Amino acid sequence: MKRTIAVMGMCAALAPAALAPAAAAQTDTRPTLAVMSFTNGALGSAQQEMAPLSAGIQDLLIDQLSANPRIRVVERGNLQALMNEQNLSASGRVDPATAAHLGKILGAGHMIFGGFVVDTKGQMRISARSVNVETTVVEYTTDVDGKETDVLVLVNKLAEQLNAGLKLPALTAQVKDSTAAAAKKVPFQATMLYSRALAAKDAGKPDEAVQLLQKSLAVFPEFAPAQAELKKLQPPGGTR
């Protein structure tokens, strides 16, 4: 209750930079989604090994959903900055009502929650549910199953199912085919290194994040999300 009351008073306390996404959204009429980090339900020794995928799946799902130009997806950095400012990241979990308030601040109509489970045989299930920001009601749930080494392929399927299940503007067949084909090319090692880089960045270790991104790109140089993240951490003329 205390947290919900505190979050309801966010708007007055937020810095102008944090309010910028919502201001921009007022002139953008596309359906808007924000994706929360995914909870880690991996079993046994995989629990610690797969922990970076909480941020990795979140970010990669944002990337896959963003392939649809007819919707808007809140950048992970904007959501993370808002959560950090409100001291919500430390808890690891945000209830639907609190997330709905975050969504309103960010100009999102749908908040995506999710989690993943990996069993001792390397089988993975990724589940997702969408909460309507206006009503705080769960409006859609879905999941995908497959091998842990095919995590990016599973995220691609999850994005397609969310797009269809939420009745968002349809993807063209060309976009579907191209994103699915691209997902199949990325090695699992590159995906995990990228996820570890995001975790390092979130932990305030940018130098470690840069090294991990470089290793990810060494494994798969065409990995677009890693290229984009490295540019953020290593801008032209930067010193890092």
Image (spheres, rainbow, N blue to C red):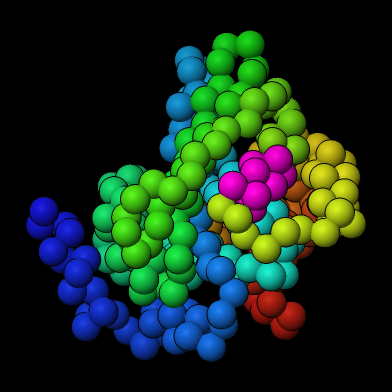
Task: Write the residue at 66% across / 57% down.
Answer: 65
**Place of residue 10 in the rendered image (x, y in percent of width and height, measured from the top left):** 24, 74
Left or right: 175, with 150 as reference point: right
Residue 125 location, quadrant: top right
Q: On the image, which quarter does residue 84 sit in?
A: bottom left
Q: Residue extending furthest top?
A: 121
Q: Residue at x 44, y 48 (%)?
A: 139
Give the residues in magenta: 156-165
Residue 160 magenta: yes
Location of the C terminus by quadrant is bottom right
Q: Which is the main secondary structure of the residues drawn in magenta? A: helix
Residue 68 lies left or right of residue 37; in this view the side is: right
Query: Which residue is at 65% across, 49% downward?
Result: 164
Q: Is residue 101 above or below residue 236?
A: above
List x then y, in percent, for residue 153. 75, 38
Q: Is 108 drawn above or below residue 215 in the view shown?
A: below
Q: Could you tell whether 200 is left or right of 158 in the image?
A: left
Taking the image as drawn, is residue 98 in sight? yes
Indicate yes or no whether the magenta region holds residue 164. Answer: yes
Q: How many marks?
A: 0
Picture residue at 45% right of the left edge, 66% below the top: 109
Q: Is residue 128 above or below residue 116?
A: below
The residue nearer to you, when weighing 38 against 52, is 38
Q: Residue furthest left?
A: 2
- Picture coordinates of residue 193, whole percent (x, y): 67, 43
**Residue 84 visible in the picture:** no
Question: Is 184 located above or below residue 159 in the figure?
Answer: above
Q: Position of residue 133 (x, y in %)?
A: 37, 62
| Depth order, front residue of 40/24 | 24
In this view, which residue lies farthest toward the front?
167
